[in-house]
Amino acid sequence: MKLFCLFILTFFNSLGFSQIDSSNFCIAFYNVENFFDPSNDSLKNDDSYTPQGLNRWTFSKMIHKRNQIAKVILALNGWSPPDMMGLAEVENGKVLKDLCIQTGLKKYRYNYIHFDSKDLRGIDVAFIYRMDRVNILESHPIPIIFPFDTASKNRDILYVKVQVFQKDSIHLFINHWTSRFGGYGATILKRNFYAKILKQKVDSILNLEPNAAIVIMGDFNDYPTDESIYQILNAKEWSEKNHKLINLMLKYQNIQNIGTHKNEEFWGCLDQMIVSNIFFNPNSKMIINPEDQNIFQSDLITILDEKFGGIKPYRTFEGAKYKGGYSDHLPVYTKIKMNH
């Protein structure tokens, strides 16, 4: 009986999974919310996330947080974890290394890319990928310096160029734009500036390579119809294929009780995936079906919202109170298919 079960499992792995893996690719993004190393960094304002700090951020809490993040990554695409994934609010390479080799991710040969930005708190964007599925061709940070506020210390945009399916390249931009802390009106110029810089980078690629495959992901701290995304970046609905960029999250715009982030009783999509229109060309090597764009709104990472009703993201902290959850954001992911 044991030999029979082993044979069935081996057969299923060799046929079922290989067929899925050979023709599908999963890309995801997740703002993991304050994934800090408990060790104090004198160059960063991370004191509240140290053992002696306000949040009493111990190594055991960090390990629990790390394991929670790994659970989400392993669960969000069913049988096969994402081939590559952008992350936001990561302090340094150490926590990323631990995530890749000290959790269940090790089995899938994940590696990471991270550059320290000038963000005062020291939280950056990062990129993890499966080394057996993705080849890195190029990576570098894109610094953001506001001409109207040169003293501001900002998070970089991370650019990564990868090769997938052993031959096709994708340009990726991982973002975490300025928050709305201080008010929408007081911060809109900063997010609009991020959008202008990103648009310049995208246009420079498309000018050289009109059919370039581009994936933009991140926590933009703006919604899909806000000025920065809809007008400056000019990311439109998938039905408007004449536009250079398609925002996959616009399909959720008029749906209640779904989103990646909840503000009081209102859900919205601060976290988005935007792609170049080549993915919707029926003659393209790689295609995206809008139905394959998903928000991972699982019971695993949500809890009942006793104040505003429905559910809400299961956070690590609520105010100063430790809850031991996951994040205040939900992940997004999409599937890219080989067009045979």
Image (spheres, helix red, strand yellow):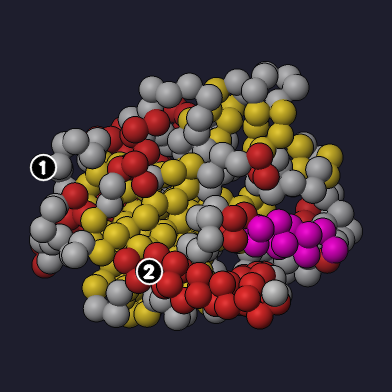
**Main secondary-structure element of the magenta-colored stretch:** helix
Location of residue 213 (image quadrant): bottom left
Residue, far front:
1
- Number of callouts: 2
Which sits in the foreground, 227 or 16? 16
Q: Look at the picture and state if 335 lies above or below 338.
A: above
Specify whether 216 is left or right of 231. right
Specify whether 58 is left or right of 10. right
* Image quadrant containing the C terminus: bottom left
- Residue carrying label 1: 242
The secondary structure type at the circle numbered 1 is loop
Residue 259 lies, in percent from the top left, at 50, 33
Residue at position x 58%, y 59% from top?
73
Specify whether 305 is left or right of 254. right
Residue at position x 15%, y 42% from top?
241
- Residue type at numbered disc 2: Gln
Q: Which residues are magenta?
A: 60-71
Location of residue 321 (image quadrant): top right
* Image quadrant containing the N terminus: bottom right
Residue 234 lies, in percent from the top left, at 22, 40
- Residue carrying label 2: 19
The secondary structure type at the circle numbered 2 is helix
Q: Is residue 194 magenta?
A: no
Whichever of labels 2 and 1 marks the residue nearer the N terminus, that label is 2
Residue at position x 32%, y 73% from top?
164
Tell me the mark number nearer the camera, choosing from 2 and 1: 2
